[in-house]
C-alpha cells in the first residue's frame, strides 16, 4: 500500500532521503545509497516520534546517535551533517501541526542528546579498537624483538602487515625502518622518513616530560614510555597519535634500537574538540556560554598577585516586549545581532564576551590595568547598542542596563563576583535603565541582606519570630489613654530586632503581607480583649489601631477575615481602627473603597495615615470612608522650637478646622515635648502619640507607664 501523497509517511521518506544524501559520502559503509537510506528510515521514524512525544526521552535520542556509529558513520562529519539535517528538516517534515516554538526547542534537545549518544558509542567503539590494537602492538613488539635476533623474513611479515604505524630508529635517533601504515599516517615516502631524526619531530604542544622520557630510554634507564603526541604533516595539518616507544636490546641485553608504535587519534581528537566546543558555546550566538565564562573568570581570579579583573554584566532593557510582540524568531535574530556587536567590543588582549542565557551577556577583561580597561569596555558596549537593529523591516532601538565590577584577583570567588555584578545591573535597571553602574560594596551588602530577609520571611512567621509592640494614643483634652497602635517587629536570628520599614516592603513584594497582616490583626484584637477584660471595660486602651497595607486593601478576603477575627475574639467592631496611608487611597476607585466602606458601616474606624505627605486632595476626603485623620510627624517638627513656627501653626489649624467640619477626628504623630502637646491641644487636635508619652513597648508595660498630663 503506497503512502498518502504528502502524508506523514511521505514526508518521513523525504526527510530520510535528504539525510542519506548528506551523510552517505562521509560513511565507510559498503551499502549503496538507497540501501543506506533504508537503514536510516527507522531512525528518522524514531526521531519523528520523539519530536511529538508528550515527554522528552533523552535515552531514546541518545540511542539514535549511537545507532549512527553502528551504521559505520564514524567520521565526525557524519554527525555534523546529521545534526544540520535534523535542525533544518525535522520540525519542517514531522511537526507541521504542532506548536512550532516548542517543537524547535524539542528538536534542539534531541540534537544535543543524539550528539551525546554518538560520542559515547564512538568512545566505546574506539576503546574496543584500542584494546585490539594494543594487543596487536604487544604481539608485534614481541615478534619484532624476536625477529631481530632470528628471522628477518618473519619480522618483515609482521612489520609490514601491522595495522598501526611502526618505526625503528637507532639510539642516536636516526630512523632506520618504517612500515606502510606509518607512511600513510604522515603522507611521506619511505626515503623521506628514513632521512629524519627522531629529535627533530618536536611540536609546540608536546608535553614537557617527553624530552626527559626519550633521553632516559635511549640511555637504557627505562624500557618504554607512552604519551599523546602531535606531529606536523607536510600538508600543514596536524597528526595526533598515541605513541608508545620501547627499547630493544641485543642478545646480551645491551640497548640497541628504539621501536615506536603509533595509533592515529586525529579524528577522535577532532570529535572531542567539537563536542567540547558545543558544550562550552552558546548554540544561538556562538559566544562562549556560562560554563566557559566561569572557567575564564575563575582563572582570572586565581591569576596571582598584581593581577586584576573587570566584569560587565549586561541585561537588555525591554527585550521581553520585543520577544512577545514580534515572536521568538525575531527575538533570536535580535540576540544574534547584539552578540555580534558585543563580540566586536572585545578587542584588547584578555577580553572575552559570553552569553549567560536569555538576554543576559557578560564581558570580561583581565590584566594589571583593568581599572581603566573595564570603563573603556563598558563604554564600547553602551555605544554598540546606540544604532538601531533592523528586524523584519523594523528598526528596533535596543538599550541595556550594565553592572560593572572591578578589583584585584584572589579576593573573591567567581560566584561572589557574578552576584555583585548582577546586583549592580539591577540597580542600573531600577534607576531607569540604559545606563551603567559601578559596584558598591555597601549597596551589595544591602541587597544581599534584603535577599536574605526575603528568603527568610515565609518561615519566620511559622517559627513565631514576629512580635507586636504597642504605643499609646493619648486624648489631648485630659491626657487619658484612648487606645494604642500595634507596631509589628521581627526578631531575626542574625540581625536582631527589625522595624517594619526593613521587612514590610519585602512582605508586600512577596505577597506574605496578607498572612502577616492577618496574624497582626488577630494578635492585636486578642490583646484588645485582654485589656478590656483586665480593666472591666472602664479604663485602659480600649481601642486598637492596626496598620493596613495597600496589598491587604486589595485582597478579596479582607472584610470576611476581619469579621471572623472580631467574632472569634468576642470584640465589638468599635474597638478596632484600621490605618490606611493617604498614598494608598489617592485616586482609588469605588471597587478599592468598597471593603473600607463595608468595614466602616460595621463600626470599624478608618484612619487616613500620614495625611499631608502625599498629593492631598482635601475635597476628596468627602468620598473616603474615614473617620480619623493622622497628621504626619513633619507637621509637629516646627513646634519643637519656641516660639513655634507660625506657618506650621496655621497649616495645622486649617487642617483641624477642615477635619472637624467634616466630622473627622485628628490624631498627631511624633509628639516629643510638652510644648508640642500643649500647642496641639490649643489648636484643637483630638489625640496624639509620640515619645513624649511613651515609646512602643510590650503590652504588659503599657499599664505601668506614667503618662505625663498633656496640659502639664
Image (cartoon, rainbow, N blue to C red):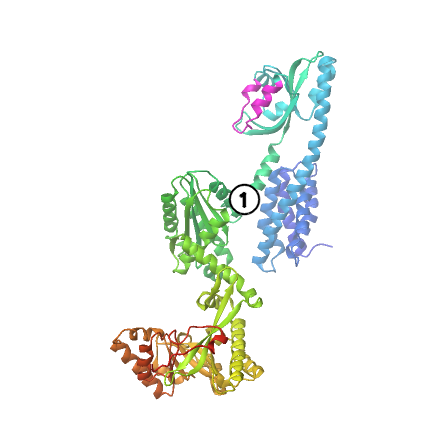
Position in image of residue 370 (x %, y %): 39, 43
- Name the residue located 60 percent from the left edge and 51 percent from the top edge: 109
Name the residue carrying label 1. Answer: 280
Q: Is residue 230 left or right of residue 548?
A: right
Q: Which image quadrant: the N terminus?
A: bottom right
In reply to whether residue 280 is colored magenta, the answer given is: no
Position in image of residue 248 (x %, y %): 67, 17
Q: Which image quadrant: the C terminus?
A: bottom left
Rendered position, 372 above or below 208: below
Instruction: Decide which of 445, 135 is in the foreground and name it.
Output: 445
In reply to whether residue 213 is colored magenta, the answer given is: yes
Q: Is residue 284 left or right of residue 377?
A: right
- Name the residue located 58 percent from the left edge and 67 percent from the top edge: 462
Rendered position, 520 above or below 212: below
Instruction: Decide which of 364, 698 is in the foreground and name it.
Output: 698
Say how many tags the image has: 1
In this picture, which residue range is highlighted in magenta?
Answer: 197-217
**As drawn, which residue projects farthest toward the top?**
252
Amino acid at each position: 500500500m503506497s503512502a498518502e501523497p504528502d502524508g506523514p509517511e511521505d514526508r518521513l521518506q523525504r526527510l530520510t532521503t535528504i539525510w542519506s544524501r548528506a551523510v552517505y559520502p562521509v560513511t565507510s559503509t559498503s551499502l549503496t545509497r538507497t540501501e543506506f537510506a533504508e537503514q536510516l528510515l527507522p531512525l528518522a521514524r524514531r526521531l519523528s516520534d520523539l519530536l511529538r512525544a508528550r515527554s522528552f526521552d533523552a535515552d531514546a535520542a541518545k540511542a539514535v546517535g549511537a545507532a549512527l556509529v553502528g551504521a559505520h558513520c564514524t567520521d565526525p562529519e557524519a554527525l555534523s551533517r546529521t545534526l544540520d539535517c535534523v535542525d533544518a528538516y525535522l520540525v519542517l517534515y514531522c511537526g507541521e501541526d504542532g506548536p512550532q516554538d516548542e517543537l524547535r526547542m524539542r528538536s534542539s534537545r534531541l540534537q544535543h542528546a543524539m550528539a551525546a549518544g554518538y560520542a559515547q558509542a564512538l568512545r566505546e567503539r574506539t576503546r574496543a579498537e584500542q584494546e585490539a590494537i594494543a594487543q596487536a602492538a604487544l604481539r608485534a613488539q614481541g615478534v619484532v624483538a624476536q625477529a631481530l635476533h632470528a628471522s628477518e623474513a618473519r619480522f618483515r611479515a609482521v612489520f609490514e602487515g601491522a595495522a598501526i604505524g611502526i618505526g625503528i630508529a637507532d639510539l642516536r635517533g636516526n630512523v632506520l625502518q618504517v612500515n606502510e601504515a606509518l607512511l600513510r599516517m604522515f603522507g611521506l615516502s619511505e626515503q623521506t622518513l628514513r632521512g629524519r631524526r627522531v629529535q627533530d619531530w618536536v611540536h609546540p604542544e608536546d608535553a614537557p616530560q617527553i624530552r626527559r622520557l626519550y633521553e632516559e630510554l635511549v640511555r637504557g634507564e627505562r624500557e618504554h614510555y607512552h604519551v599523546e603526541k602531535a606531529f606536523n604533516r607536510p600538508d600543514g595539518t596536524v597528526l595526533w597519535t598515541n605513541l608508545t616507544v620501547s627499547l630493544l636490546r641485543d642478545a646480551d641485553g645491551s640497548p640497541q634500537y628504539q621501536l615506536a608504535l603509533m595509533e592515529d587519534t586525529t579524528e577522535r581528537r577532532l570529535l572531542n574538540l567539537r563536542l567540547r566546543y558545543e558544550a562550552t558555546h552558546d548554540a544561538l550566538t556562538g559566544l562562549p556560554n556560562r560554563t566557559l565564562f566561569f572557567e575564564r573568570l575563575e582563572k582570572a581570579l586565581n591569576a596571582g598577585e598584581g593581577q586584576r579583573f573587570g566584569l560587565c554584566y549586561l541585561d537588555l532593557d525591554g527585550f521581553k516586549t520585543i520577544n512577545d510582540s514580534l515572536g521568538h524568531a525575531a527575538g533570536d535574530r535580535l540576540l544574534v545581532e547584539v552578540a555580534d556587536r558585543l563580540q566586536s567590543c572585545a578587542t584588547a588582549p584578555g577580553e572575552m564576551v559570553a552569553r549567560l542565557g536569555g538576554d543576559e551577556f557578560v564581558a570580561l577583561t583581565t590584566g594589571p590595568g583593568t581599572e581603566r580597561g573595564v570603563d573603556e569596555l563598558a563604554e564600547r558596549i553602551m555605544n554598540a547598542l546606540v544604532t538601531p537593529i533592523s528586524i523584519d523591516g523594523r528598526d528596533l532601538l535596543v538599550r541595556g542596563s550594565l553592572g560593572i565590577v572591578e578589583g584585584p584577583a584572589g579576593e573573591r570567588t567567581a560566584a561572589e563576583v557574578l552576584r555583585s555584578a548582577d546586583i549592580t545591573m539591577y540597580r542600573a535597571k531600577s534607576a531607569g535603565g540604559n545606563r551603567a553602574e559601578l559596584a558598591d560594596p555597601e549597596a551589595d551588602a544591602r541587597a544581599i541582606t534584603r535577599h536574605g530577609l526575603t528568603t527568610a520571611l515565609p518561615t519566620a512567621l511559622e517559627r513565631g519570630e514576629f512580635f507586636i509592640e504597642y504605643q499609646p494614643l493619648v486624648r489631648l483634652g485630659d491626657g487619658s489613654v484612648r487606645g494604642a497602635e500595634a507596631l509589628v517587629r521581627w526578631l531575626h536570628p542574625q540581625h536582631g530586632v527589625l522595624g517594619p520599614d526593613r521587612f514590610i516592603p519585602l512582605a508586600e513584594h512577596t505577597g506574605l503581607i496578607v498572612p502577616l497582616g492577618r496574624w497582626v490583626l488577630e494578635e492585636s484584637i486578642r490583646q484588645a480583649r485582654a485589656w478590656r477584660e483586665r480593666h472591666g471595660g472602664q479604663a485602659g486602651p480600649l481601642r486598637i489601631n492596626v496598620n493596613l497595607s495597600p496589598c491587604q486593601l486589595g485582597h478579596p478576603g479582607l472584610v470576611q477575615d476581619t469579621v471572623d477575627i472580631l467574632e472569634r475574639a468576642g470584640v465589638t467592631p468599635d474597638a478596632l481602627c484600621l490605618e490606611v496611608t493617604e498614598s494608598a487611597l489617592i485616586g482609588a476607585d469605588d471597587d478599592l473603597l468598597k471593603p473600607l466602606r463595608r468595614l466602616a458601616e460595621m463600626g470599624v474606624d478608618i484612619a487616613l495615615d500620614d495625611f499631608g505627605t502625599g498629593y492631598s486632595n482635601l475635597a476628596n476626603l468627602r468620598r473616603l470612608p474615614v473617620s480619623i485623620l493622622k497628621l504626619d510627624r513633619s507637621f509637629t517638627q516646627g513646634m519643637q522650637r519656641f516660639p513655634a513656627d507660625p506657618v506650621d501653626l496655621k497649616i495645622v489649624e486649617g487642617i483641624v478646622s477642615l477635619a472637624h467640619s467634616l466630622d473627622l477626628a485628628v490624631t498627631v504623630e511624633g509628639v516629643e515635648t510638652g510644648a508640642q502637646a500643649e500647642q496641639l491641644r490649643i489648636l484643637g487636635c483630638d489625640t496624639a502619640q509620640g515619645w513624649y508619652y511613651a515609646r512602643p513597648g510590650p503590652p504588659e508595660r503599657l499599664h505601668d507607664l506614667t503618662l505625663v498630663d498633656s496640659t502639664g
